[in-house]
Image (cartoon, helix red, strand yellow):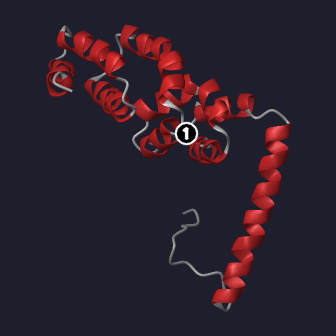
Amino acid sequence: MGARHSDTEVNPAVTSAEEAWQAMKSAEDAYYRARMAFVAAGPEAVLREQLGGARGRATALRVLADLLPDHTVNLCPEVFEVAVSSERDLALARQVISRVEPARLSRVLPPVVRRFLADEQRDSWQYRRAAELLDLLGQTELLSELVEKANHSKDHGIRDVGRDFGAA
């Protein structure tokens, strides 16, 4: 069985709050230096790859949360996909994408959402997550497109999403 990590586990080498603080500060300083080197090296290809797999996805999202929103704009299709498909990481993906200015999202989201809507393999859970995300982002025109498509679906669950968000 693998190691389990939680907020209550204690590093036996750290004996006081001050030592714990210094350890956290050192770790944050190291993270900052590594993040700066990562950005300087051109992070988007690695982030794109990590967003596509479960193993590094949460780390990639946390890094994106620390970077300028320009990186999220460039990775909008991948972040959107996580926000509508990953139960574990959807809250963090929503947080990351919501940092982008609404006007910029209005320019980059339409093709992403239209690809989503064109995919007949999408299920009601994904439709609901997409509707929630578009509502959160204030993307009312795209939400209306989703509702229209949902209302004409053969899938009862997807039609429920259309009904639930139709008055939005």
**Which quadrant of the structure image shows residue 15?**
bottom right
The residue shown at (66%, 31%) is 70
Which one is nearer the viewer's eye here, 9 or 95?
Answer: 95
How crowded is the residue under tag 1: few (<14 C-alpha within 10 Å), some, or many (20+)? few
Residue drawn at the location 18% of the way across and 21% of the way down: 166
Quarter of the image with the C terminus is: top left
The residue sitting at the bottom extreme is 15
The image quadrant that residue 51 belongs to is: top right
Q: Considering only vertical position in the picture, is 123 above or below 82? A: above
- Which of these two is toward me, 13 or 37? 37
In this view, 78 is above or below 107: below
Asked where in the image residue 145 lies, by quadrant, the reply is: top left
Label 1 belongs to which residue? 54
Find numbered disc 1 in the image and state the secondary structure of the residue it sits on. Answer: loop
Give the left or right position of residue 56, taking residue 95 as reference: right
What residue lies at 34% left-to-right and 10% top-to-bottom? Answer: 120
Can see residue 122?
A: no
Residue type at mark 1 is Ala
Q: Which residue is at the front of the view, 134 or 103?
A: 103
Task: Give coordinates of residue 53: x percent, y percent.
Answer: 58, 34
What residue do we see at 78% from left, 71% from top? 26
In this picture, residue 93 sits left or right of residue 144:
right
Q: Position of residue 91 (x, y in %)?
A: 43, 45
Q: Position of residue 40 (x, y in %)?
A: 85, 39
Along the line of sight, which residue is nearer the eye, 127 or 33? Answer: 33
The quadrant of the rendering that contains the N terminus is: bottom right
Going by the image, does 156 lie left or right of 112?
Answer: left
Residue 72: tell me if it is visible: yes
Query: In the displayed structure, would residue 133 be above or below residue 107?
Result: below
Question: 27 left or right of 163?
Answer: right
